[in-house]
Image: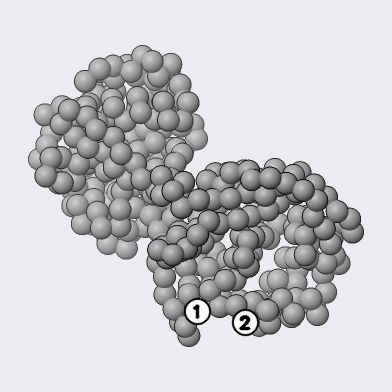
Amino acid sequence: MDLFSQARLKLKLTRPGGAPVLTSARLRLRPVHEGDLPHILPGLGNYDVARWLGEVSYPYTEEAARQFIAQAASAPGRVWTIEHEGAAIGGIALQPELGYWIARHAWGQGFATEAVEAVIDAHFSRPAAGTLHAALYQSNARSAAVLRKAGFRADGGGLVAAAPLGQQVPAQRLTLERGTWRALRRYRLETPRLRLRELRPGDWRAVQRIGSDPRVAPMTMSTAMPWLRADVERWIALSRYRGRPGFRAAIVLPGGRLGGVAGLGGAPLSCAFFIDPALWGRGYATEALSAFLADCARRFGIDRVEADHYADNPASGAVLRKLGFRQIGTGTGHSPARLEPAPILLYRLSPMSQRGST
């Protein structure tokens, strides 16, 4: 069955020239340098961007941009340029509050959330790192959604100077505690025979072995034969748990062996799974998915989920029907492990209370 694809974080830190570079699933956050001028000047010179940044003058001048670059160079590890596919699309900083901007043409693609979570993970990777702080205009609903999604919670308010607007405006202050961050990175669920937890970078060998098996890969829309390590690691990076739908969980047997994966995400919200062929016929898929869906319904307040399977994969259909899914149509699936598109069957479980028992 397909496991959806949403950008989630895989954090790596490198230090070219002594300055930290953060890499996530789609982004590279690197130190600011003089070559960023052609990106910063039009990016912050766009009023749709500048109006939400309290200390950015408008109109934005080349002198202001050069001054910002010089200041950023004096604070290595605190200010980054955000790159996507080699192109600079924004900036993010901890000075000391968390702040960021995304170029207007790159809005609506989840880049802000991904960059914010990369910096948050880097911050809390230091054992002595304390609470994170941020502030935004009360009218900035987009940034409020990004920060709340990352775990920030309101912590007072007041008036702040808004340079682009030439006035003071109501603002909201937010904080993110280490304990909240840690809870949003861990997923735990127990069943009578299994344990489900967040996927981790170190799971790549087991995920690669199962996902590239010729009995498994043609039944998914995201794994391949062969499935290269770099692609598996990226797949896991896209699967990280962030305290909301849009993640995959490892299905673990007693003793710690990874036996499969279950996931929830996409639009419309869909679930998916695969199990090690060595474990087929023991009811593990039904047990894991039943508990997983019930837990997600409680955690996230969802009451409808969809799923699909290839028409030549009746075993997955049997699992779905046992859990209360009903077929709602047909379609066509595209798997990297198949030479051609193939027919799929579409299912829906609604309300979630119809979920079957194991």
Q: Is residue 124 left or right of residue 282?
A: right
Q: How many marks?
A: 2
Residue 312 in the image, given as x and y percentages of width and height: 24, 31
Q: Residue at x 40, y 63 (%)?
A: 127
Name the amino acid, label 1.
Ala
Tell us which disc is closer to us: 1 or 2: 2
Instruction: Read off the residue under disc 1.
Output: 19
Q: Residue at x 37, y 32 (%)?
A: 271
Q: Is residue 41 left or right of residue 77?
A: right
Q: Residue furthest right?
A: 166
Q: Is residue 341 shown to the viewer in this render?
A: no
Instruction: Read off the residue under disc 2.
Output: 74
Q: CA distance from mark 1 to mark 2?
A: 11 Å
Residue 205 in the image, given as x and y percentages of width and height: 20, 57
Ranked by sequence position, the earlier of labels 1 and 2 is: 1
Residue 111 in the image, given as x and y percentages of width and height: 57, 55
Task: Answer few, some or many: residues within 10 Å of disc 1's Cα (few below 14, many 20 plus, some between 14 and 19).
Answer: some
Taking depth in this image into account, of 70 and 131 the one nearest to the observer is 131
Task: Answer few, some or many: residues within 10 Å of disc 2's Cα (few below 14, many 20 plus, some between 14 and 19).
Answer: few
- Quarter of the rendering occupied by the C terminus: top left
Taking depth in this image into account, of 351 and 116 the one nearest to the observer is 116
Quadrant in the rendering for residue 64: bottom right
Residue 323 in the image, given as x and y percentages of width and height: 29, 19
Q: Is residue 188 shown to the viewer in this render?
A: yes
Q: Residue furthest bottom?
A: 17
